Amino acid sequence: MSSGYDLHSHSTASDGALSPAELVRRAASHGVRHLALTDHDTVSGIAAARRAAGELNLELIPGVEISVTWEKKCFHVIGLGVDPACEVLNRGLAELQRLRDQRAERMAADLEKHGIDGSLEAVRDMAGDGMITRTHFARFLVARHYAPSVADAFERYLVRGKPGYVATRWAALEQALEWIREAGGIAVLAHPLRYRITASWLRRFLTAFRSAGGRGIEVVSGNSTVEQVATCADYARRYRLLGSVGSDFHDPAFPWIELGRLAPLPPGVEPVWQAL
Ligand code: AMP
Ligand code: MN
Ligand code: MN
Ligand code: MN
């Protein structure tokens, strides 16, 4: 029996393939009753998602997935239940948008040095008013036959050490948590096992996250194994964090992750929605 909650998803406001309204309709048709839209570093899709949710039996929880740099490593912190009109939050996100625009220019210049032209215009076109992400570059590289799939495009061009990779210093952890708190939201660590870090680094991060005001951790992700859920549930109990469930859905073309297809939270983990 599904909880009806999916607290992590993307739309065309960042690197999702569906518009906010299309995303909400797909969520409803997959049994989601409470959906958080959590685009990368933007809340610009929330208004349209809310309008679409209003026509269906679905609660839209306004959210955001903030890019954070802590000790030179990138983490994703989700704000759930944030007020999209909050000025402090919007000022912070505007700064991240500036960093994203700058990074896109540098990525395009690097790719050009490797003989790949035209990426900046293409990703700007694709992103429209939305945030430019590495996923846009990946789609461009696939469309131009530089890579057979988005995953390959990342491995060949877009990860550390590859031609199109540009290191970026995102928001500081304390900053991101302050923006979320000011916007009345709850900070949740996204996909704890997807960072390329050791368990001891993750434990250090969780200690810092907890003491800076972080309150939740994603225990169930879109493609979590039973073992991964158990590991994350353990972190939730040990660090006294609320448990979240979120598919991190981006694109119907990636059928291994679907909206609302999530295992239940294990016993002893308090659901984050009790605090929303
Ligand atoms: P960015 O925040 O612009 O650096 O892009 C990060 C996004 O790229 C993530 O949210 C994922 O959606 C996507 N991504 C990162 N690594 C991979 C990968 N190896 N394969 C496919 N998508 C990826
Ligand atoms: Mn993404
Ligand atoms: Mn993420
Ligand atoms: Mn995400």
Image (cartoon, grey):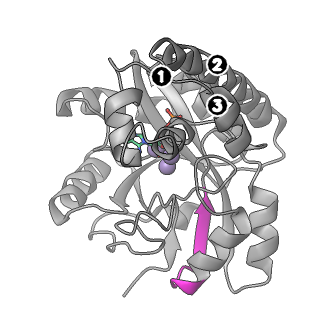
What residue is rendered at 28% in x and 66% in y?
Answer: 268
**Residue 105 disc label:** 2
Q: Is residue 257 above or below residue 196?
A: below
Identify which amino acid the numbered label 1 is placed on.
Thr
Please name the residue that numbered disc 1 is placed on: 69
Identify which amino acid the numbered label 2 is placed on.
Glu
Location of residue 120 (image quadrant): top right
- Is residue 57 rendered magenta in the image? no
Identify which amino acid the numbered label 3 is placed on.
Glu
**Residue 12, how many percent across, how many down?**
67, 54
Confirm if mark 1 falls within 8 A of ligand 1.
no
Quadrant position of the C terminus in the picture: bottom right
Please name the residue that numbered disc 3 is placed on: 178
Q: Dot 2 lies on which element?
A: helix
Horizontally, is 42 left or right of 253 in the view?
Answer: right
Q: Dot 3 lies on which element?
A: helix
Ligand 1 is in which quadrant of the figure? top left
Please rate how many residues cluster around mark 3, counting C-alpha atoms within 10 Å: few if below 14, some from 14 to 19, many from 20.
many
Residue range in magenta is 29-37
What residue is rendered at 58% in x and 24% in y?
Answer: 117
- Is residue 30 rendered magenta in the image? yes
- Residue occupying the far top of the picture: 113
Location of residue 81 (image quadrant): bottom right
Confirm if mark 3 falls within 8 A of ligand 3.
no
Q: Is residue 114 above or below residue 212?
A: above
Q: Nearer the viewer, mark 3 or mark 2?
A: 2
Instruction: Work out how far the residue at label 2 is from the one at label 1, CA to CA, in angstroms.
Output: 20 Å
